[in-house]
């Protein structure tokens, strides 16, 4: 029975415990978390992107292009694909490769490209960026989607996307098992979000941090997941136990794992990932055992990578006492100014930043206090994004200059500056020369000045957070609550699609208002949080020295 386990490419990026649960016959009727709407939307977006790329390729390649109907059954798709490969069709879209029962593999690939020397190489289409500005990537024009047309690209370097290479490795092993792999070094192509070139990967080059090739990394992961699935199917002792990791937040099996972890008070409820594994290896398997350790020990039982050992012990003690926030310092220090601005940006994936929201407060400078937004409601990507960013930057610069002219100090605040910094710099670069758009040098000078304050960094340095440091987790401690019960970055992606009519529907004004209200609440959350952190209320929180 175990030999009947067949796994697809996604399994190598999946949690080992999830693989077990998906193949354990006893778990078939166990209730799972509802599908994540944001993840469902991303899948739909990816499918639309693949369809658009397929249509472009079909027009370019003409009679050499053949598509396997996606509406057919899996068995029929596999049969049609096999016939097309046997006939030597140059380009096969949507093929389902012959299954590999011996290897326990199954799956398909967006495009199979015939080599001039016989056999096929796989090509996948993804909805994320696959390259960055630089040089050295091997690319070919979209009109020449085969490795022989690849050249060293002076404008692009490879952006690390391990999932892409592992998918290509899976398809390569299926091609090899069926006898249809191209001769020579294993190679695979990727068309990314920009869909302007094909990026080619050498799957036998030792490009992974551990020195492995993409194929050898894939082989190791797939063999492990196959063993886990076969043990689950045969109802042998599980080869994977639950442990909290980042992916748990959106996993349908999290309710099952959370119940088990809380029942055993597992140490991963406080420290995640490899730190939890390392602690279990020393016998520290529960939060209780972690809390019993000396936080000031000169030689901790094991080095941790996710946080300092002292923090781990103190977090365990806070968790046991039901404390969400604990002060690291006697007195919390938040830089303040006469004129203050809270800033929050809304983006749509990698497509761009469509909204810059601000909350102005502090000393009067003849500028109305409160919320203002700078937005574009043209579907991204659009040149109008440059106009909205320029208006935001020009207005903020005016506030800064008026404050300075009156001898007043100025500071702008955000929560986790990585996103805002990315899009300020990206906007300055992409829309350079447009009226009001600053230079990247001007943006960098502002980011590196004392006028730009990241509240996330202050929270990280001055608090221990037992349940995470996200704004949605921390702001309620300061008494702030979002008006929209569905407020969140992932849900805002869905609202944005409706707001701009991205799916061919009429733009919805109510969703635009919803996004503006959500953004206003975000900047009000940072305003509330920093005011609270500057008050005596924050100093009523427990102090780590008391733990």
Image (cartoon, rainbow, N blue to C red):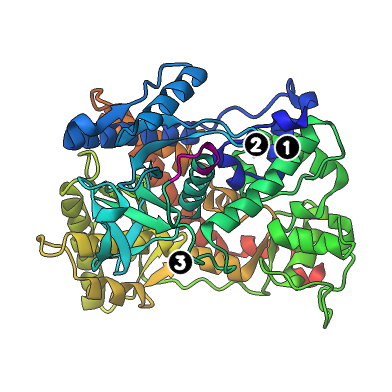
The quarter of the image holding the C terminus is bottom right
Return the x and y of residue 524 as percentages of the image width and height: 43, 50
SS of the residue under disc 2: loop
Residue 155 among magenta residues: no
Instruction: Determine whether label 1 and label 2 are within 8 Å by CB.
Output: yes
Would you say residue 255 is visible in this rendering?
yes
Label 3 to label 2: alpha-carbon separation: 49 Å
Front residue (pair 75, 472): 75
Q: Which residue is mark 3?
A: 454
Residue visible at 42% across and 63% down?
417
Residue 364 seen by the camera: no
Front disc: 3 or 1: 1
Q: Say which label, 1 or 2, has the lower sequence index.
A: 2
Q: Position of residue 272 (x, y in %)?
A: 70, 56
Residue 229 image label: 1
- What is the secondary structure assignment of the residue under circle 1? helix
Residue 301: assigned label: none
* Percent position of residue 215, x then y: 54, 55
């Amino acid at each position: 029975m175990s030999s009947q386990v067949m796994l697809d490419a996604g399994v190598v990026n999946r949690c080992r415990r999830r693989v077990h649960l998906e193949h354990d016959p006893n778990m078939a009727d166990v209730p799972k978390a509802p599908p994540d709407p944001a993840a469902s939307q991303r899948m739909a977006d990816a499918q639309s992107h693949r369809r658009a790329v397929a249509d472009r390729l079909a027009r370019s390649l003409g009679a050499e292009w053949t598509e396997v109907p996606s509406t057919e059954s899996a068995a029929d798709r596999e049969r049609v694909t096999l016939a097309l490969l046997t006939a030597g069709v140059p380009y096969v879209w949507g093929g389902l490769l012959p299954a590999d029962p011996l290897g326990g593999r199954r799956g398909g690939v967006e495009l199979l490209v015939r080599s001039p020397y016989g056999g096929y190489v796989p090509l996948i289409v993804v909805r994320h960026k696959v390259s960055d500005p630089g040089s050295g990537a091997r690319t070919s024009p979209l009109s020449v989607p085969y490795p022989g047309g690849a050249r060293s690209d002076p404008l692009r370097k490879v952006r690390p996307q391990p999932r892409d290479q592992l998918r290509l490795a899976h398809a390569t092993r299926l091609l090899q098992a069926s006898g249809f792999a191209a001769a020579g070094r294993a190679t695979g192509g990727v068309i990314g979000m920009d869909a302007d070139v094909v990026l080619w990967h050498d799957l036998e080059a030792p490009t992974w941090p551990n020195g492995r090739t993409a194929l050898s990394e894939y082989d190791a992961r797939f063999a492990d997941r196959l063993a886990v699935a076969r043990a689950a199917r045969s109802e042998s002792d599980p080869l994977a136990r639950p442990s909290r990791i980042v992916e748990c937040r959106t996993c349908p099996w999290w309710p099952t794992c959370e119940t088990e972890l809380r029942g055993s008070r597992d140490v991963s409820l406080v420290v995640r990932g490899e730190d939890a594994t390392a602690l279990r290896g020393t016998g520290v398997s529960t939060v209780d055992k972690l809390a019993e350790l000396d936080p000031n020990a000169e030689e901790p039982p094991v080095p941790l990578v996710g946080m300092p050992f002292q923090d781990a012990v103190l977090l365990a003690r806070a968790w046991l006492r039901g404390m969400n926030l604990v002060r690291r310092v006697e007195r919390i220090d938040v830089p303040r100014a006469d004129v203050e601005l809270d800033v929050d940006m809304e983006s749509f994936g990698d497509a761009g930043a469509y909204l810059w929201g601000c909350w102005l407060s502090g000393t009067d400078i003849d500028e109305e206090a409160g919320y203002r937004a700078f937005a574009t409601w043209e579907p991204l990507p659009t040149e109008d994004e440059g106009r909205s960013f320029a208006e935001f930057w020009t207005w903020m610069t005016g506030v800064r200059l008026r404050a300075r002219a009156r001898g007043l100090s100025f500071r702008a605040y955000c929560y986790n500056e990585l996103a805002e910094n990315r899009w300020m710099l990206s906007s300055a670069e992409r829309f350079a020369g447009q009226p009001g758009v600053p230079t990247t040098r001007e943006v960098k000078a502002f980011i590196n000045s004392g006028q730009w304050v990241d509240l996330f960094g202050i929270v990280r340095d001055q608090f221990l957070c037992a349940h995470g440091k996200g704004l949605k987790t921390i702001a309620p401690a300061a008494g702030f609550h979002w008006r929209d019960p569905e407020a969140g970055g992932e849900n805002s992606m869905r609202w944005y699609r409706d707001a701009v009519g991205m799916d061919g529907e009429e733009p919805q004004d109510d969703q635009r208002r919803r996004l503006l209200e959500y953004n206003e609440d975000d900047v009000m959350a940072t305003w509330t949080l920093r005011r609270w952190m500057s008050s005596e209320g924050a100093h009523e929180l427990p102090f780590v020295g008391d733990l």
